[in-house]
Image (cartoon, helix red, strand yellow):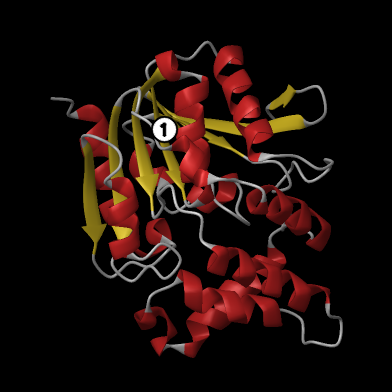
Amino acid sequence: MPILPRPDVDLYYEISGEGPPLLLIPGMLSDSASWLPVVPLLSPHFTLIRVDNRATGRMQDCGPFTLADCVDDIAALLDHLHLTDVHVAGHSMGGFLTLMLGERAPDRLASVSLMTSAAINAPRNVLLFEQALAMRQNTSLPEGYWLRTLFPWFMSPAFFSNPANLDAAIAASHAYPFAQTPGAMELQLNALTGFDASKHVRPLPCRGQALLGANDLLFPETDAREALGAFADISITTVPDAAHSIHWEQPRKVAEALRSFALNAP
């Protein structure tokens, strides 16, 4: 099990595939396993480096932290693996971390891809996660009730046309051996709540693209395009029939967009 010891936490990561390095940074409530739908599509073209963020997956044994601490972990991993010319894709909160990594290690990056993400502080999203945590901590509510309130924010309407889809997703979440605990969820939420995305609107150190979901409720297309307009020369693509969990609903389109952008440099 690949572990990089850090001063106050052990960083878990996985490497697979062959080709130029592509670092995949997960979003809120997610860990390295969240990229599984696109791994078989990307591994023939890239050496994939997937990380767990603090308070997720195998990194839940940690104290309070900031998003800057997560970026320091990732930068240390790039140093440890002696990686340069790295392509980076960050989903949702992972997009925040991607922008911060561009400031922390600009000379190491070849391209960045922001997936259903932009430099937006959305109090509504923080409130949504706060309410989900409160429901999770309320033992009088049925098990998994908090997940049922979150999934409509993550998936497109078509996902709910078959009730079995939601039941299966919740069952898989409960069965996952490294599911985030309520305490770890609170730590991650605290880190997100104290984050100011506006401070990270500055020129990108490399080529950049953004993939938006046409049905995304957390980062609506109109708001995201406005925020992304502050970055010069970033290409923006909206993926139809995709909501916030864009790489779960449209893995082939996402994988092709990442492959084409990274490997077909102008």
Q: Residue at x 24, y 66 (%)?
A: 240
Residue 62 seen from this side? yes
Circle 1 sits in a helix, a strand or a loop, which is it?
Answer: strand
**Splitting the image into 4 quarters, where does residue 46 fall?**
top left
* Quadrant where the C terminus is found in the figure: top left
Label tally: 1
Coordinates of residue 184 in the picture (x, y in percent): 78, 53
Amino acid on which the number 1 mark rests in the picture? Val
Coordinates of residue 114 in the picture (x, y in percent): 38, 44
Q: Position of residue 129 (x, y in %)?
A: 64, 67
Q: Which residue is most to the top?
A: 82
The answer to whether residue 178 shows anywhere in this view is no
Q: Residue at x 43, y 19 (%)?
A: 106
Closest to the observer, 245 or 165? 245
User: Mark 1 — residue?
Assistant: 88
Q: Residue at x 17, y 29 (%)?
A: 264
Q: Residues within 10 Å of mark 1 (few under 14, many from 20)?
A: many
**Residue located 35% across and 39% down the image:** 113
